[in-house]
Image: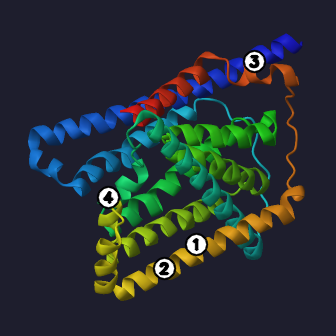
Amino acid sequence: MEQEMIRYTRKHFSKLGLMYVLGSLIITAGQIISTLIVRFLQPALLDNYNYVTLIQMLPMYAVTMPLMALLIRTVPAERPIMQKKMRISHWFLAFFMCYGATYLSNLLGNILTQLIGAIKGDPVENAILGVMQGLNPILSIVIVGILAPVMEEFLFRKLLIDRTIAYGEGTSVVFSGLIFGLFHGNLNQFAYAFVIGMFFGFLYVKTGKLRYTILMHMAINNISNISMILLKAAGLDKLISSGSYEPEQIIPIMMDHMLPVCLFVCHILLILGIALTGLILWIVFSKKFSLLPGEIVVPKGKRFSAYICNVGMILFCLFWIVQIIWQLFS
């Protein structure tokens, strides 16, 4: 009986992993094909970073991600999650905690990538920073601040958790973070996407309502958008790009952009305040977090082999780990 259940579990997670890796391949192929079409029809557009982003992102959100969702839906959902309302005060409390965890994990991820850069003798590019620096602010708000949270929460919270919840809330939460983190394809983002993915997963399993995590995802992404807008207004983005922080370069820029610099400093102080408050709340409320077991209980010593050591999950992990390593050392 136990062996039968483990075989069923391995098959279920393997099919789930296969759908996610097939979806990842479709997204990658869609971006390559759309770029090649534009290169053939209107190559001059590829000289503009904003057009390149639109060419790659619009087909992803309009076509390839919906196709990925259809593939995932071929895996049967285990059971619906009981829906519960969340008070506004509780949502804000959760937001502070989420941002604190995100800030700390992002800091650790940056430290790790810098260490890797020092070891290999060449800095590791911060992929998301490069993207946001090159994007038009309005385009960044639409793509990073609106479209990404909606589609990512649907793919990596609802569809994933609905198909793993029978194995326990803890299993669903960890898988939500792991698959979401790997999907970003670089170590900088994996560090905080893994943490934020688990936190959003926890909110979803406890409320059954995606709107809470979508709104929180939007809030966190748009804080980054505001940071970049203010950074550009203050003229400091060029210093970051050049990696030069000499006083004789910084002081003239600050004098020429006094108001934007003041706004940027106030924004950074606000972010630090939110992050610090969130970390304090973690200390206060950490013992209140609890995760319920599922209807299907896999013995402790056999969970890793059942959940991860199957064809689908191995392929998914390899696909994205290779990309992460390539990004680190390319």
Callout 4 amino acid: Ser
Q: CA distance from mark 2 to mark 3?
A: 55 Å
**Of label 3 and label 1, which has the lower sequence position?**
3
Q: Horizontal and vertical percent for residue 151?
A: 50, 51
The kind of secondary structure element at disc 4 is helix
Q: CA distance from mark 2 to mark 1?
A: 10 Å
Q: Label 4 belongs to which residue? A: 241
Q: Quadrant of the C terminus?
A: top left
Give me the residue at 54% from left, 21% from top: 315
Give me the residue at 53% from left, 31% from top: 20
The kind of secondary structure element at disc 2 is helix
Q: CA distance from mark 3 to mark 1?
A: 46 Å
Q: Residue furthest bottom?
A: 259
Give me the residue at 59% from left, 46% from top: 191
Q: Horizontal and vertical percent for residue 86?
A: 76, 67
Choose between 111 and 246: the one closer to the eye. Answer: 246
